[in-house]
Every structure is written in C-alpha cells, then in structure tokens.
Amino acid sequence: MSGRLEGKVAVVIGAAGGIGQSVAESFAREGAKVVIGDSKEAEGRAVAQAIGGDFLATDVGRHDDVQALVDFTIARHGRLDIAVQNAGIYPWQLIEDTSPGDWDRVLGVNLGGCFNLARAALAPMKAQGGGRILFTSSITGPRVVGPGHGHYAASKAGINGLIRAAALEFSAYGITVNGVEPGNILTDAIRLHRGAAYIADMEASIPLGRLGSTRDVANAFVFLASDDASYITGTTIIVDGGQILPEGNDFRIEVKSL
C-alpha cells in the first residue's frame, strides 16, 4: 500500500466479482473508503465486508438506484471523491437474433449505467470542488469487434463518447472523467463460459502472450483515481497486452539470444 487514495471516498458499481472486485480491493489497499453497489447482493456484501467497506444493492440501469447509492455514500462518509461504473452485461447474440428488448437491456446497463452514475455524482462533486468519474469501457467497440457483440460493442463505443462529452462539461467544476479499455481479462466468467480452447486462442493473438489479470486493470483505475492523474481527462487507458496492435495473426518474431 502506498496510500495514493488515503482519505478518499469511492463508489464502485459492479464490484461483486471480476474487475470491479479488484478495483474495490485496490482502492481499499490504497487507503480509500469504498462503497460497493451491485445487483448481486450476497457476493457484493461479502466483498464489502472483506475490505471493510459498505454495500448497497443497486441496479445500475435504474437512475433512482444509483442516486440512492450516491445519497447513501454522502450520508455515510460526507463526500464522494471517486465514482466508478464497472457493471456490464455481454450476452452473445448476432444482430439478426437480437430483439429490441435485448438491445435496450444491454445499452441500458452498460451505457445507461454510466450516464446514471455521472448524473448522480455530479452534484456532490460540484459542491466539494472536484472528483474523479471513471468508467469501464472495452477494446471491443472502440477498437475491435467480433460477431455476436453488436449491442455490447455499441454500448462500449458510446461510453467513450460519453467520457469525452462529460469531461468537457464537468471540467469547470474540477471533475475529471476517464475510462479504462480492458482487452481479454482472465476472470471467473471467462473460465466458466469460454473455456480453455478460447483462452488458448486469445493468448495466441496477444503479443504479451497471456490474458490480463483483473489486477492489471485495477492498477489503471488506481492511477486515474489518484492525484497523479489530476491533469488527465476525457481519455481512456488501454489494458490489453498489445492485442489491438498486430495487422494479422502472423506477428511473432524469432527472438535472438545475446
């Protein structure tokens, strides 16, 4: 622990597991008081208890839920310095098989959730003269795409647009708005739903030769939440092991020994 977030109060939505859990844990290690919001109540409470934080059941797609989470945080800690929206859903569906309801659900959680948190966090951050708003975007949508992720890709590309717009609008209040674009990250969900063959295929396409860890992503969030990033706004950090760099699959070079 280096204490980079000492004395800060953070809300992390979508921290019951995976990337969000690592973000919440890393924030706590760096000295922040963390309030977790998640729709998975049992898992979210367990993470909050483990890091000495607070928990409130939250559906990020519902503005009233997100507002209640922010209000709870202010009542509990008196301020809000860092707001992170990490919750997201990514059902695999071809566009031709995606119903209007499916589309609205993915966009409502992934992109709508970011709007809901930005809107709810704005007033207290304005009142205290600054803050950090951070979103989990993705390389899928802004940089690359695969079949079956039309709604997900659109939501993540939309997040990047929202980051830029909010950063511009909120800059006068001392509020920075940024995001992180993870590539393929080795979460429990990837292990469960994708399997070993998928993981091996992805590893072969990543120049650094491995999937990222959730801690790799959390490290970028800690930096953006800290005073070290006070002059950074309206942008994203790509955490993908170089996945978006190659023009094709044949990118390995022979390593010559010294």
Image (spheres, rainbow, N blue to C red):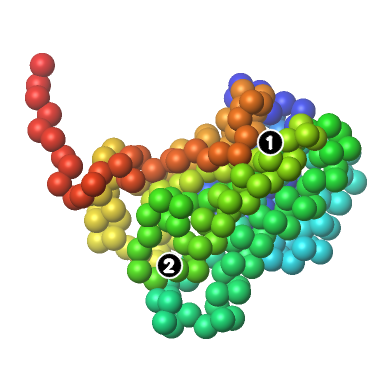
The answer to whether residue 207 is seen in the rendering is yes
Image vertical order of residue 66 relative to residue 26, above or below: below
Q: Position of residue 209 (x, y in %)?
A: 26, 42
Q: Earlier in the sequence, mark 2 or mark 1?
A: 2
Left/right placement of residue 155 relative to residue 212 reads right
Which residue shows up at 52% across the image and 34% down it? 219
Q: Which of 221/98 is in front? A: 98
Q: Quadrant of residue 254?
A: top left
The answer to whether residue 82 is seen in the rendering is no
Element type where label 1 sits in the image: strand
Say what amino acid the circle numbered 2 marks.
His
Residue reaching furthest top? Answer: 258
Left/right placement of residue 88 relative to residue 36 reads left
Q: Position of residue 247 (x, y in %)?
A: 23, 47
Which residue shows up at 58% across the image and 30% down it? 223
Is the C terminus in the top left, top right, bottom left or bottom right quadrant? top left
Q: Position of residue 38 (x, y in %)?
A: 67, 59
Which residue shows up at 26% across the image and 40% down it? 207
Which of the numbered marks, if any, corresponds to residue 126? Answer: none
Say what amino acid the circle numbered 1 marks.
Thr
Is the N terminus in the top left, top right, bottom left or bottom right quadrant? top right
Q: Which residue is mark 2?
A: 149
Q: Which of 147/49 is in front? A: 147
Q: Residues within 10 Å of mark 1 (few under 14, many from 20)?
A: many
Left/right placement of residue 148 relative to residue 196 reads right
Q: Which residue is mark 1?
A: 176
Q: Quadrant of residue 33?
A: top right
Confirm or deny contact between disc 2 and disc 1 (CB under 8 A): no
Q: CA distance from mark 2 to mark 1?
A: 29 Å
Left/right placement of residue 65 relative to residue 179 reads right
Which residue shows up at 37% across the image and 54% down it? 144
Element type where label 2 sits in the image: loop
